Image (cartoon, rainbow, N blue to C red):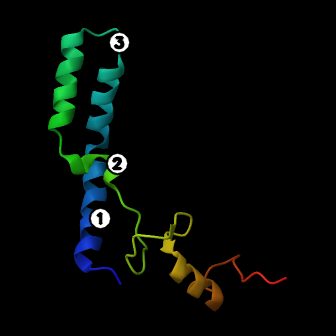
Amino acid sequence: MARLSSIESAKRIRKKVDSKKVKRAGLKSVIKNKTLPAEERFAAQLRLAAMPRTSSATRIRNRCAITGRARGVYRKFSVSRIMLREMAASGLIPGVRKASW
């Protein structure tokens, strides 16, 4: 089980990313627009750099929904490989069963 602080930190980062997503996208579109004057695009770059780093989507870390494990997380199920195996063996995931040949 991951530390509770790391799980809560990941939740906080996701929340911040969601709240700043529109503003960040607007600034990026201004920066990429080559028809605007260079001064205006540079000012947008400075405003983007002044935003909190945790509002960037690359700061999000995928974690297991059950244990909080950060590595080996399947996006489709949002659980770690260990929990996926246990849940599949117990029959808790519909359509997933152990392979045998």
Amino acid at pointer 3: Lys
What is the spatial separation of the Cα atoms under label 2 and label 3, in whole angstroms?
A: 24 Å
Residue labelled with disc 1: 10
In this rendering, is residue 30 above or below 26?
above
x, y (%) of residue 59? 31, 53
Whole-angstrom CA distance, mark 1 to mark 2, is 12 Å
Of the numbered discs in the image, which one, if any, rests on residue 57? 2
Residue type at mark 2: give it: Ala
Most distant residue in the right direction:
101
Amino acid type, mark 1:
Ala
Q: Which residue is mark 3?
A: 34
Question: Which label's residue is closer to the chain start, 3 or 1?
Answer: 1
Crowding near pointer 1: few (<14 within 10 Å), some, many (20+)?
A: many
Q: CA distance from mark 3 to mark 1?
A: 36 Å
Labelled disc at residue 96: none
Within-10-Å neighbours for mark 3: few <14, some 14–19, many 20+: few
Q: Secondary structure at mark 3?
A: loop
Secondary element under disc 1, as helix, strand or loop, is helix
Residue at 29%, 50% in the rendered image: 17
Quadrant into which the C terminus falls: bottom right
Image: 21 above or below 15: above
- Residue shown at 24%/18% (left/top)? 41
